[in-house]
Amino acid sequence: MAVGCRAGARQFPPGYLRTSHLEHQPVIVTRRQWGLAQPISLLAASLALVSLPALAQQPRLYQVGGGFLGGVTVEASAIQVENFFYEDSESVSANGYRVRPSASLTRTDSIGSLRLDGYGEYSDYDLRGSLDSNFDYGASARYDWRPLTKHSFDLAGGYQRGHDPAGLVRTEEGRPLFDQGEVDEWDQTRLSLTYGYGSPSSLARNELSVGVRNREYVTNRDATRFLNYDTLQLGYLLSYAYSPKTAFLFVLNNNAIDYEIPVRASGNRNLNELAVRTGVRWVATAKTSGDVQVGVRSVSLDGRARPSRQAFAWRANLEWVPTARSTLRLSTGESTSETYRNDTLYIDNKSYSLSWRQSWTSRLDTSVSTSYVESEFVGSGRKDETVNANLGIDYQVLTPLTLFADLSSRNRESTFNGLDYDAPQVRLGVRWTP
């Protein structure tokens, strides 16, 4: 659920995204207040947000017929990048621009709500060749259906055409891999369904979820076929309301990854991850809310003689709203991600992030965020530490027109030689929400 409008401040939507050339995967910051008496689908949110196509700032909505509300946002920005290819030395600077239109349709009735989103993004830089010009696009749909008091269904799906920036993922080894003349582009589709049982006044609520995702690379096929994969996610959530402001959680998740080419030099990379966590979700006061989960997870690989790897599992999300205009968020957790290297079975991540958003006036907003990710490339002995930082400012000149600027930096240190980099970026732009 979206946070209500703060006095004198503009609203920013759930899932407000701030993306950059440095962050080829959108960073999703959920903005919500947990009403414990209301049925909340944690599993549906986690499944639906996987690879969600990035959306611009929430547009103003207008009646477009058939009970639908529609809105459009257009964002244009100039970008200066200091280390375009993410290199350890001899970095290349580039200047460019990005244009990003997006649109949304929503409809709500007595038994459910439907939301449709779509976007396109074109970027171009002043470098030679085709590695500096990209066009990404995508669409998503989500329907929340509550036909009976105790039952609910959440169906979500989407398609995305994206790319891996030159110098990251498969091409992180350096310029010799750029000889193909085009970046690694991929198509990604996803679909998830969540069933919930429990009325708003029930002490207990149960949720069952299933989600599938497919990523297939469409360029440089001879080199990228081994990156194609499918995932299957199954989940169960039990939420028990201990008090009006506190609920105990029991979460069971299973994630299976199957590669188009499962066997590489590292062995069979197909894996199955099972995680069991328990925790608590609370709204202590009007200013503080959050959830904390701890447990254990086990990762097993197909066709491997060695036993599965077990590790401590945790996730925590805390939000503090000291004033009506200020919001601080702290998030931490662990996760397993797909490998993109021939010598690695999978990537084990531990992440920590902190963000602060401040609305100084009804027109001026600032944001500061930082994150730290520790990644272990299981099977290769490699370990990375990545630090991201972002400083942003938005100023609403007119009702439909906002000027924005942000300074971003991404720094990586690796135990493997030649993979360290520091990549700062400056972006200036305008956002139009008619």
Image (spheres, rainbow, N blue to C red):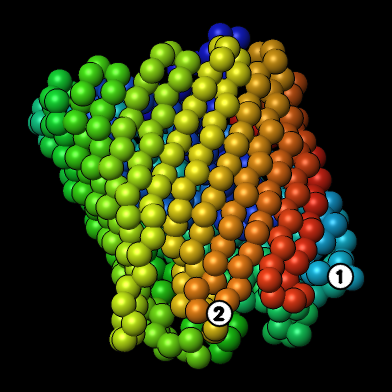
409 vs 358, left or right, is right
Find residue 359 and report its image quarter: top right
| Mark 2 crowd level (few <14, some 14–19, many ≥20, 10 Å Cα) | some
The C terminus - image quarter: top right
- Where residue 308 appears, x then y in whole percent? 32, 73
- Where residue 97 appears, x then y in whole percent? 78, 52
The answer to whether residue 57 shows anywhere in this view is yes
Mark 2 or mark 1: which is in front? 2
Marks 2 and 1, how far apart at CA = 24 Å
Q: In this rendering, is residue 384 above or below 434?
A: below
The local secondary structure at tag 2 comes to loop
For the point 58% across and 58% down, the residue is 374
- Total number of numbered discs in the rendering: 2
For the point 50% across and 44% down, the residue is 332
The local secondary structure at tag 1 comes to loop
State the residue position of label 2: 380
Q: In this rendering, is residue 232 above or below 58?
A: below
Find residue 148 and report its image quarter: top left
* Label 2 vs 1, first from the N-terminus: 1
The N terminus - image quarter: top left
Find residue 206 and report its image quarter: top left
| Mark 1 crowd level (few <14, some 14–19, many ≥20, 10 Å Cα) | few
State the residue position of label 1: 89
- Where residue 327 appears, x then y in whole percent? 57, 23
For the point 75% across and 67% down, the residue is 420
Q: Amino acid at mark 2?
A: Ser
